[in-house]
Image (spheres, helix red, strand yellow):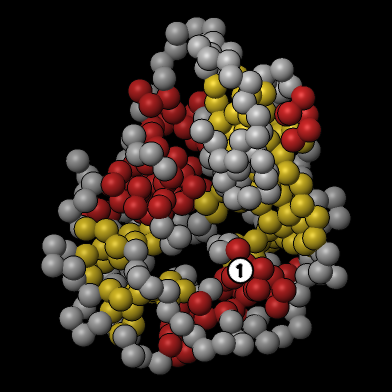
Amino acid sequence: MNRGARKNMGIVSERTDRKRVRRAEVVCGSGCSHVALTVPCRSLARDVALEVCSACAKCRAMPEDPSIEGAEVVCRVDPPTSSGPRLKDLDVVEAALRTPVGEVVSAEAVALERDVPVTVATKLGRDRGLPAIAVIDEDKKPTAVVTWSELVEAAGTNATVGDVGRPLAAAYAVDGPLLHVLPALADGTVGYAVVVGRDGTFYGLLEAADVARWLARRAGYDL
Amino acid sequence: MTTVAEIMNPKLLYIRDGDCLASARTQILRFRVTAVPVLDDTHRPVGMLSLRDLSNDDEPVKISTPAATVKASASVEEGARKLAESSFHHLVVVDDKGVAVGMASAVDFLRAILGLEPRHPAAFDPY
């Protein structure tokens, strides 16, 4: 059962799906922080607020504390309309073509406004164990990424993440196929890909490790 | 079955347990890697040192222990699982005696499962 479920309507004989609660945090230069908790909704093909998810007729369980890491919701899944192949039976390329990026990207997203000092970003990245952090503009659209190389090289200076971030080379749609992101990750130049929502706002960083996790699950490992 | 030995980078950039950790920072930045294993006198991994570990100027540098390892003979899928379960983005590859023989990154696993050839830096200078 999902962690910390507070309601379960007890309906059996139906297919259910677990969805990880997404935690998106934006940190501003003055130190303020705004956190949004959402759930990726397959029916609506977008992320929805927890209140919307909870009010949905398909909702079967909500987490007691949605802010804890690993919190999940449980919802009813409509039966498949066709008897197509299951993802795990497909070869990896076909499976990656059918899997949206949003299903693989980490459930925790942290973004920094460009005037956040490097010292703040370094502490945040260390405390959260982040491999890289996106820098966003006033419209919440990603403009750059700071990695540990930039943060360590700029240590002891008054630089901001806007000063040291690597300009964004490409961004990938959250509802686009995972297959489109794989060449960039497999290239190895950077270990992440920036993912954006339909409106171009920052959604998350997809890491090669996220894809490794997806691959391991497909191979049958319970992660 | 593709094994980790076939996809790893056999050129191992490492530091020895007891080396000056602060000086490792220069090397890590120079070679544009994000972490290096820390090996003991018998070449067995005892931890990892990452740029993240080196980023805290307020405290003495500490290595992350234990190192995340995988056997060279393990399958790529098993290695991907170990990587996914760890908090690292690299695994130290060890032989049957636990001696470090290479490094495998998330990108290495990704390339392997996509059927791409391994791709690594040509060489590390002596360190």
The location of residue B8, given as percent across then percent down, is: 28, 59
The location of residue B2, given as percent across then percent down, is: 22, 45
A71 over B44 or under it: above or below: above
The location of residue A216, given as percent across then percent down, is: 37, 41
Dot 1 corresponds to which residue? A127
In percent of the image, x 57 and y 79: which residue is there?
B55
In percent of the image, x 35 and y 48: which residue is there?
B80
Rendered image quadrant of residue A152: bottom right
In this view, which residue lies farthest toward the left? B97
A162 over A6 or under it: above or below: below
Q: Amino acid at mark 1?
A: Asp
Q: Residues within 10 Å of mark 1 (few under 14, many from 20)?
A: few
Rendered image quadrant of residue B88: bottom left
Q: Is residue B38 left or right of residue B21?
A: left
Q: Which quadrant is home to the N terminus of chain B?
A: top left
Q: Chain of mark 1?
A: A
Q: Helix, strand or loop at disc 1? A: helix
Q: Is residue A40 visible?
A: no
In percent of the image, x 78 and y 33: which residue is there?
A51
Q: Give the number of callouts.
A: 1
